[in-house]
């Protein structure tokens, strides 16, 4: 199985901050990397597919980049509704695997 | 707009079988654009893929769950189902169903059901 490792595991930031979350795959996954946002008690929501494709309706302050083994999710200017847990997922090979999540908290 | 909703018992006894159903609305489960997936999340932990099923009945499941997983689809009801046998406390989790879009260039889970907590306890 491909292991997905996110860093940091948690992050404290303020409204307006620029935030970057990293996801690393245990082997090359090309651009087969998705990002999800999960709020407490809610289901994950797809934000970005194929490393950098923003889903319809997702604010443009979210962006994704990377290929191979190293990927980043960036929020350019944090808004109050962005405090949540973010998770990456590889779709390069079965089984699809997820990172352990990065909890973004308000400072 | 596609919507999914899980249903099933919230409490299962150890060694018994967990059974969940996912009802799809806003679209046909027979769509050739989607597989239908199950993912779980133990309390305070990360997401684990359980398996996917196509409307034709073809299934793919996580080898880590070995032969405990059975999935089925009922196109007449626009539903798909999960059975997980011989459960233990380690199977306690929020269980999500999700649409799995798959193409030659990408694949992802979207949308997801709201999730249902299943607790394994006597």
Image (cartoon, rainbow, N blue to C red):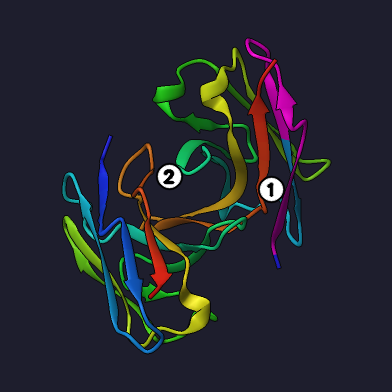
Judge by depth and name the residue closer to the eye, B43 or A49.
Answer: B43
Q: Residue B114 at what x, y percent from top left? A: 67, 53
| Mark 1 belongs to chain | B
Q: Residue B28 at what x, y percent from top left? A: 73, 54
Instruction: Tell me the residue at 33%/60% (across/down).
Output: A10
Q: Residue B111: which quarter of the image?
A: bottom right
Q: Check contact, mark 2 vs mark 1: CB within 8 A.
A: no
The C terminus of chain A: image quadrant: bottom left
Mark number displayed over residue B30: 1
Q: For residue B36: magenta?
A: no
Highlighted range, magenta: B2-20
Image height of A57 relative to A10, above or below: below
Are callouts 2 and 1 both on one chain?
yes
| Mark 2 belongs to chain | B
The N terminus of chain A: image quadrant: top left
The alpha-carbon separation of the residues under discs 2 and 1 comes to 30 Å
Q: Quick one: SS at disc 1?
A: loop
Q: Within 10 Å of the Cα at label 2, are there few (<14), some (14-19), or many (20+) other Cα atoms? A: some
Mark number displayed over residue B11: none
Image height of B6 relative to B87, above or below: below
Q: Quick one: SS at disc 2?
A: loop
Instruction: Tell me the residue at 25%/59% (across/down).
Output: A8
> Dot 2 corresponds to which residue?
B46
């Amino acid at each position: 199985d491909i292991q997905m490792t996110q860093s940091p595991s948690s992050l404290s930031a303020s409204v307006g901050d620029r935030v970057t979350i990293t996801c690393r795959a245990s082997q090359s996954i090309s651009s087969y990397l998705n990002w999800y946002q999960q709020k407490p008690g809610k289901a994950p929501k797809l934000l970005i597919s194929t490393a950098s494709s923003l889903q319809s309706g997702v604010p443009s302050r979210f962006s994704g980049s990377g290929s191979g083994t190293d990927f980043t999710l960036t929020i350019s200017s944090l808004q109050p509704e962005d405090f949540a847990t973010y998770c990456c997922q590889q779709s390069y090979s079965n089984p699809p695997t997820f990172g352990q999540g990065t909890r973004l908290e308000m400072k | 707009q596609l919507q999914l909703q899980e249903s099933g018992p919230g409490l299962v006894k150890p060694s018994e079988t967990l059974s969940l159903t996912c009802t799809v609305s806003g679209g046909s489960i027979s769509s050739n654009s989607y597989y239908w997936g199950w993912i779980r999340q133990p309390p305070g932990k990360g997401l684990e893929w359980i398996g996917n099923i196509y409307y034709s009945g073809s299934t793919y499941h996580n080898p880590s769950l070995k032969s405990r997983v059975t999935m089925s689809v009922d196109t007449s009801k626009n539903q798909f189902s999960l059975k997980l046998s011989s459960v233990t406390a380690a199977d306690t989790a929020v269980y999500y169903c999700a649409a799995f879009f798959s193409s030659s260039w990408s694949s992802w889970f979207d949308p997801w059901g709201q999730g249902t907590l299943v607790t394994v306890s006597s």
